[in-house]
């Protein structure tokens, strides 16, 4: 029995250890981040931080762009305007010439000044095909540093909407480091030694966290009058929903940017946990979830069939069911609420689809889809049986449930759809190469212009691999030309753009290259125990986004870091 | 003796070769292309660039050569301790990633296995033929040994972590600390370590205790025990001999159970989000990192084989009969 004392001793040791470390986090110890000065976030990183290379989209640690590297402009989706950031001002000196002036006195973290040559070098990197923005050279003629602080970009083809999208999403890189790299080094480099201009610098990382430390020398403190509140930002790699939920409930996480099923119950019961809206849908909208049909396959190549499918879906049931009112139904155009001005409401009224099972059946009948063999499902006009699959990634529980409901709704009007749940990577591979019937996709985030959405729907030509846009392989020259025209509208000409989007919507609503389903939320649940004054609908509260997803810091989420206030 | 060890070594070597081969095959015959999914995340739109990058990464991961060559170069790399490059943590070598996680797994696994075995055996021996203990604590042992590791882990996390708030429920150490050699950090490590350890320890304990109790009862029925008792030997002495004999099947049991215990520890780690091999397996599965997955499995297989081999040798040392048999057989 003597040895029983060993576990007892271990237990005692562990309890003492807990007692000692329990309060440890609050001490001003050298080995810890003081709780009152640290912001704990999660929901952005899906794997260990391994790269800080801003050219490798989808690989770099969240915050690399936004906290460390900065862009020339921000885009403020609430006001619909561009906010000068590294740039001081800009001017279109001719229809196809954009002149950007940089702020004075910004230095890179290695002491070199930020100069116009840096912007030019960053653009030049796009000459390499493997850099994700290589497409900008399709319409840029030249980029020159006309003096120390002025960049003049001349366009061969005028596409201000597309150009401004690049401007606010892509950071300026220091020419003295990046300009002379080989193509493979550019994309392969993990870029551990970040030389940037931003309000935060790399502090440390392990496999389950990324720690940023405030840069007290940041230019924006003076120039923008912004003071970043948290001294440390600890971004925690996504754990399971249960672990995250526990940590939110205990106030160990200040901000969680992930969809947590049932979070509405916590938002309603725990006064310390808040989201943007007090009631449904609780969150702002971040992007549109589309039902993408593969239009190269019969009968999905028939617009009437797609119309019938769109009419068959009872979106209310999906929103009340798997989403417990955490999302909103999408407009038939699929454009986000921020883009209201671009939606032709009259047209939507007349041509937009709504849930109507009888209508769906009528459309099918008119187009010749009948159930001749009496199995409960319609056949094609040629009498071929129809059996389609709707694929969503395995493990995405909300989408899986939604896919099951959609399949059920379609079956109710006689369209035989079965929901399937392959592995995510297998799904994307098949989707990219066009080996699918129907998928749900939401990979286009909100942006400065609805052009990005129409680019997503209509982009031509269709390649063997469609990795980012037009997964459904829909080909319509007329629509694509309109989209190209839209890109050419001056960035601040909303009316001019709305005229074109109305024409595009006419084609879109008739053809339905993809069926808009719901707006995915800008998932953001914050706790008030250590940091307060989170963005919310309440009067006087900040309106910026409280989401550190890639691309959102440049859409104003960076302000949230200056707006939150420490408790006590 | 040496012949015995030699024969054992040969069997282990054969197992090793087969395990490595299966291990190499699984990721390569699974659906999905790791390089393409890595590039899909990077959202490269330009088709030519995509082609170029695919070629480049296929070369980096050695996927551009014929299968048989990949197999042999895998063995070559393996003997040099090179398990390839991780996709998830690109460009870090798989070996480095695994070595970072191993201390956490071993820290939970070794004390849990050894302590539960030692304590369980002693306790089982003590409880055998004692009416009160037999009727009270042993049924509890049956319940414990039938408990799935994961379930007990969840239960402990909930009761001692969430409700009582005594121990942290997840991770290897607090998010507020940097890994350092300070008392603060070490105490934090220990408090995070305790729950994963406890759940492993408790489940294993029940099994050993029951096994030992049954063996002791069996040994006490044996002729030599009856003879000793008839000679009037004290109860303690009889039990001492019974215990020694009952130990032998328990040692074999340890070798047999090792695989199950390791599988259990991997699940336990996942529940506690403990940064050992188990959590690494889940992460590499999530990011389709077949090279890392392959490396971890290989590591586990090698670990189990080595442990079994050690137990085999210990068995020879502990049980004089095997030695006698072997020397008798060889001369």
Image (cartoon, helix red, strand yellow):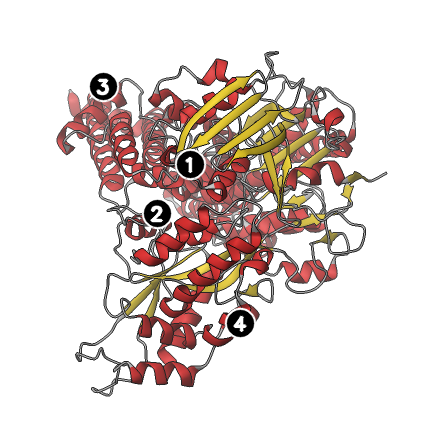
Residue A9 appears anywhere in the view: no
Q: Which numbered disc flags the more N-terminal residue, 1 or 3?
A: 3
Give the percent coordinates (x, y) of residue B209. Answer: 50, 45
Q: Secondary structure at mark 2?
A: helix
Query: Both on one chain, marks 2 and 3?
Result: no
For residue A346, the mark is 4
Foreground of the two, A325 or B202:
A325
Q: Chain of mark 3?
A: B
Q: Which numbered disc flags the more N-terminal residue, 2 or 4?
A: 4
Point out the residue furthest to the right here. A568
Residues at badges 1 and 4 in contact (C-beta under 8 Å)?
Answer: no
Residue under label 1: B247
Q: Quadrant of the C terminus of chain A?
A: top right
Residues at badges 2 and 1 in contact (C-beta under 8 Å)?
Answer: no
Query: Both on one chain, marks 2 and 1?
Result: no
> Closer to us: mark 3 or mark 4?
4
Q: Secondary structure at mark 4?
A: helix
């Amino acid at each position: 029995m003597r040895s029983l004392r060993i576990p007892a001793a271990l237990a005692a040791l562990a309890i003492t250890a807990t007692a000692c470390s329990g309060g440890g986090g609050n001490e001003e110890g050298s080995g810890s981040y003081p709780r009152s000065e640290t912001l704990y976030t999660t929901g952005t990183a899906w794997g260990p931080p391994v790269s800080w290379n801003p050219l490798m989209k989808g690989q770099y640690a969240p915050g690399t762009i936004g906290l460390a590297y900065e862009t020339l402009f921000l885009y403020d989706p609430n006001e619909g305007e561009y906010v000068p950031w590294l740039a001081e001002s800009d001017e279109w000196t001719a229809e196809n010439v954009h002149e950007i002036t940089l702020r004075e006195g910004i230095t890179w973290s290695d002491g070199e000044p930020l100069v116009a040559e840096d912007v030019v070098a960053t653009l030049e990197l796009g000459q390499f095909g493997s850099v994700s923005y290589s497409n900008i050279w399709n319409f840029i003629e030249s980029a020159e540093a006309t003096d120390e602080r002025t960049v003049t970009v001349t366009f061969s083809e005028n596409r201000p909407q597309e150009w401004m999208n690049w401007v606010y999403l892509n950071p300026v890189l220091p020419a003295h480091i990046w300009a002379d790299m080989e193509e493979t080094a550019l994309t392969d480099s993990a870029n551990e030694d970040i030389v940037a201009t931003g309000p935060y610098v790399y502090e440390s990382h392990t496999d389950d966290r990324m720690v940023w430390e405030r840069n007290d020398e940041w230019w924006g403190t003076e120039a923008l009058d912004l003071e970043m509140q948290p001294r440390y930002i600890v971004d925690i790699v996504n754990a399971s929903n249960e672990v995250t939920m526990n940590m939110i409930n205990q106030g160990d996480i200040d901000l969680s940017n992930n969809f947590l099923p049932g979070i509405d119950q916590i938002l309603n019961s725990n006064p310390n946990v808040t989201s943007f809206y007090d009631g449904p849908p609780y969150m702002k909208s971040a992007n549109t979830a589309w039902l993408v049909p593969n239009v190269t396959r019969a009968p999905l190549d028939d617009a009437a069939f797609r119309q019938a499918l769109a009419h068959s879906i009872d979106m209310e049931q999906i929103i009340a069911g798997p989403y417990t009112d955490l999302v909103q139904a999408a407009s038939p155009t699929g454009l986000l609420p921020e883009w209201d001005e671009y939606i032709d409401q009259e047209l939507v009224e007349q041509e937009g689809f709504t849930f109507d099972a009888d209508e769906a059946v009528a459309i099918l009948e008119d187009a010749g889809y009948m159930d001749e063999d009496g199995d409960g499902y319609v056949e094609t006009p040629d009498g071929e049986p129809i059996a389609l699959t709707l694929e969503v990634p395995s493990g995405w529980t909300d989408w899986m449930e939604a896919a099951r409901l959609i399949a059920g709704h379609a079956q109710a009007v006689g369209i035989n759809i079965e929901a399937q749940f392959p592995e995510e990577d297998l799904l994307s591979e098949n989707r990219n190469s066009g080996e699918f019937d129907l998928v749900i996709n939401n990979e286009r985030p909100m942006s400065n212009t609805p052009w990005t959405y129409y680019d997503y729907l209509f982009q031509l030509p269709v390649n063997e691999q469609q990795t980012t846009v037009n997964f459904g392989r829909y080909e319509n020259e007329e629509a694509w030309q309109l989209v190209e025209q839209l890109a050419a509208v001056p960035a601040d000409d909303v009316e001019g753009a709305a005229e074109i989007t109305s024409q595009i919507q006419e084609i879109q609503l008739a053809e339905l290259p993809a069926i808009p389903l719901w707006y995915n939320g800008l998932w953001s649940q914050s706790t008030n125990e250590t940091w307060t004054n989170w963005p919310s609908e309440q009067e006087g509260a900040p309106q910026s986004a409280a989401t550190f997803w890639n691309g959102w810091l440049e859409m104003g989420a960076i302000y949230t870091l200056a707006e939150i206030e420490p408790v006590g | 003796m040496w012949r015995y060890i030699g024969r054992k070594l040969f069997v282990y070597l054969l197992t090793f070769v087969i395990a490595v081969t299966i291990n190499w095959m699984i990721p390569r015959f699974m659906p999905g292309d790791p390089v393409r999914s890595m590039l899909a995340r990077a959202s490269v739109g330009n088709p030519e660039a995509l082609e170029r990058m695919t070629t480049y990464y296929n070369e980096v991961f050695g996927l551009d050569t014929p299968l048989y060559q990949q197999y042999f170069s895998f063995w070559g790399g393996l003997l040099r301790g090179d398990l390839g490059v991780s996709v998830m943590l690109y460009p870090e070598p798989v070996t480095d990633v695994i070595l970072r996680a191993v201390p956490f797994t071993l820290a939970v696994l070794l004390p849990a296995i050894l302590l539960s075995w030692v304590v369980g055996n002693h306790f089982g021996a003590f409880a055998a033929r004692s009416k009160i203990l037999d009727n009270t604590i042993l049924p509890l042992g049956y319940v414990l040994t039938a408990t799935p590791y994961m379930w007990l882990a969840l239960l402990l996390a909930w009761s001692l972590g969430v409700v009582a708030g005594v121990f942290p429920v997840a991770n290897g150490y607090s998010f507020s600390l940097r890994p350092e050699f300070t008392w603060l950090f070490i105490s934090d490590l220990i408090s995070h370590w305790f729950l994963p350890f406890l759940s492993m320890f408790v489940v294993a304990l029940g099994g050993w205790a029951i096994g030992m109790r049954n063996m002791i009862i069996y040994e006490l029925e044996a002729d030599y025990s009856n003879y000793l008792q008839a000679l009037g030997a004290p109860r303690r002495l009889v039990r001492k001999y019974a215990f020694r004999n009952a130990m032998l099947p328990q040692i074999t049991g340890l070798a047999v159970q090792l695989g199950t215990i390791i599988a259990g520890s991997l699940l336990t780690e996942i529940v506690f989000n403990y940064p050992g091999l188990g959590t690494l397996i889940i992460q590499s599965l999530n990011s389709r990192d077949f090279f890392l997955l392959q490396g971890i499995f290989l590591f586990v297989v090698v670990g189990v084989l080595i442990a079994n081999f050690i137990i085999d040798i210990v068995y020879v040392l502990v049980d004089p009969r095997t030695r006698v048999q072997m020397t008798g057989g060889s001369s």
